[in-house]
Image: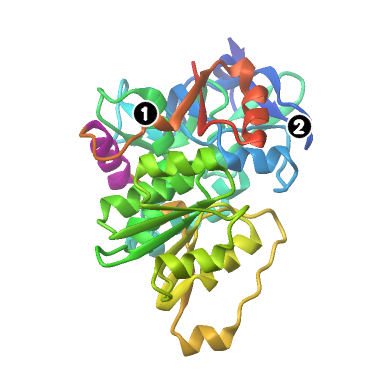
Amino acid sequence: MIAPEHGREPCMTLEFDAAVFRTPNEPLTIERVTIPSTPPPGEVLVRLQASGVCHSDLHVLLGEWEVPSPMILGHEGAGIVESVGEGVTTLKEGNHVVLCWTPSCRRCRYCIGGRPVLCDMVSQHSANHLSFDGRSRITSAGEGDVYSFAGLGTFGQYTLVPESGAIAIRDDAPFPQSALVGCAVTTGVGAAVNTAKVRPSDTVLVLGCGGVGLNAIQGARLAGARKIIAADISDEKLEQARLFGATDLINNGREDFADRVRQLTDGLGVEIAIEAIGLPRTIESAYEALARGGTAVVAGQVADGMRISIDPFVMSDQELSLIGSNYGSSKPASDFPLLIDHYMNDRIDLDSLVTNVIDLKDVNEAFDEMKRGVGIRSVITY
């Protein structure tokens, strides 16, 4: 098929179905869209094999995050490189890859300084759901550009991403589990290992036992934390947390949260608290649960406009830290393959995270289950 792209010379395109967001609080619609079949310089065309349905996508669907539309949602994907553009050197056709929603330019001060998730190009373009050149790669018949969530748009079988937005992994890893490394696994494990730098002497508290929280628990276990306390309002999720490595459980829907933390820590509080929900009150609770010198890590994503309140005197007097964790403070190029190796060698559990494998047409039902707190992760397979 021949079609013009954004006023450029005509080029070959691929047609495929995608789940498109148009209006908050309305179901996604399955629509036919097109993408160039030849990647621009520095980019790769990926044929998706699996995509997780993540709570960040739900933020958009509920109107809690303002985004342009129409937009293909999804940002947690794994697939196979279909073709590579001019200048691409680290990937080739046939590579198995996990997609990264913070592709890095490898040149700015953040990339050079070892913090690629803060790359200048991400803040300029990927955060605005565009490619590095400020354009969209997807079009819809008669409507023009379609945005791709976080520059990826994994709720469709094809995507074009910068070379650094596709991380090569081993070929024997299953795609549904690998897809989750593209967001929840890296975000959670990284919050404990990279951001909090959990030590074997630490007691770690994780608030929220969804995809990110369960992986924060796995990260704390990997780091050898002496005690891992999981807090949630769901007994089912707390039991899942125990399977992932939690040593103690708090149902803060029916227990006095602060009192239980004191009981479990001999009145001292925790060295590390990781908030994995994205609510102001739970962020404040994480901070208030700290022992002197402790660190609270905000890994959960809040709705637009939310604010928290803390006592700055207590912060200075007790030398408390409240820090953010974006994508688990990861270096995706090295961390993604490492996490896959951990999984393949039974050091972390990704199988139990995949509680529902679905077709693209069932994506709205997956969001309904997420709202009800059913399961851990639905994964679309293509």
Q: Of tags 1 and 2, which is closer to the observer?
A: 1
For marks 1 and 2, the one nearer the N-term is 2
Residue closer to the observer: 140 or 118: 118
Q: Which residue is mark 1?
A: 351
**Residue sitting at 27 percent across and 50 percent down?**
222
Looking at the rendering, the stretch of residues picked out in magenta corresponds to 333-344
Name the quadrant containing residue 141.
top right
Name which residue type carries label 1.
Asp
**Magenta-span inclusion, residue 264:** no
Name which residue type carries label 2.
Arg
Count residues near mark 1 (Cα–Cα under 10 Å), then give few for <14, some for 14-19, many for 20+.
few
Give x and y (percent) for residue 117. Answer: 43, 54
Count residues near mark 2 (Cα–Cα under 10 Å), then give few for <14, some for 14-19, many for 20+.
some
Residue closer to the observer: 319 or 30: 319
Give x and y (percent) for residue 215. Answer: 40, 45
Look at the picture and state if 310 lies above or below 110: below
Look at the picture and state if 168 lies above or below 171: below
Give x and y (percent) for residue 360. Answer: 59, 18
Q: Which residue is mark 2?
A: 22
> In this orientation, does residue 101 appear?
no
Label 2 SS: loop
**Residue sitting at 68 percent across and 31 percent down?**
145
**Magenta-span inclusion, residue 343:** yes
**Residue sitting at 73 percent across and 36 percent down?**
69
Label 1 SS: helix
> In this orientation, does residue 319 appear?
yes
Give x and y (percent) for residue 183. Answer: 46, 41
Which of the image's four quarters has the N terminus? Answer: top right
